[in-house]
Amino acid sequence: MGAGKSTVGRRLADKLGRDFYDSDHEIEKAAGLSISDIFAKHGEADFRRGEKQVIRRLLDMPPHVLATGGGAYLDPDTRAILRERAITVWLNADIETLWRRVQKRDTRPLLQRADAKEHLAHLVMERQPFYSQADLVVHSKDGPHTHTVNAILKALQTWKPK
């Protein structure tokens, strides 16, 4: 949430000559509702079930760059299929950077609360053990997203499957 997955993913796909997909966008297309509306009308559990289905469908497609929602990697089944069928990248950013970025949009259902910054910090701490299982860890800092894209490209050059 706020690490730059969609923006960096789009630019990475362009550099690699691959298609780009954003699982949140694909979920919205499939449901005919925004992520916020899905959360409001159906709850997070239903959203996560749909997210898992969409990610499985996307992973059946030819190689591409996929940006998943921040909570997708928490689900053991989703994480397993991503680890099996993709090279996973954690865009690691500090809380202050994430907070600055997420404040630019008010479309994040998990942050629609009075203590949003504290909750963001809690989510990051809660998710870190899962995110750290990614194949590659790249720091997403303030500044041009090109730096993050180049860091991913460099990491991919030396990556070896486990």
Image (cartoon, helix red, strand yellow):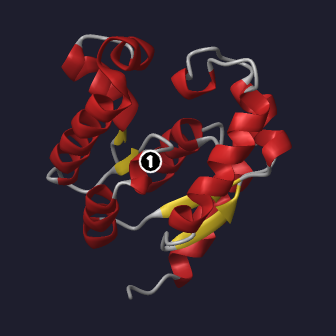
Q: Tell me the quadrant of the picture where the N terminus can be found.
A: top right
Disc 1 marks which residue? 13
> In the picture provided, is 94 more to the left or to the right than 72?
right
Q: Residue 155: where, in percent of width, then height?
A: 59, 74
Give the residue at x 68% y 55%: 125
| Position above or below: 149 against 14 | below
Q: Quadrant of residue 73?
A: bottom left
With 54 as the anchor, is 96 left or right in this view? right
Q: Residue at x 51, y 64 (%)?
A: 130
28 vs 47, nearest the viewer = 47
Q: Secondary structure at mark 1?
A: helix
Counting from the top left corner in percent of width and height, residue 103 is at 75, 22
Q: Is residue 157 left or right of residue 50?
A: right
- Residue depicted at 26% across the width and 30% down the height: 46
Q: Is residue 36 above or below residue 155?
A: above
* The C terminus - image quarter: bottom left
For the question of whether residue 142 can be seen, the reply is no
Picture layout, residue 60 above or below residue 5:
below
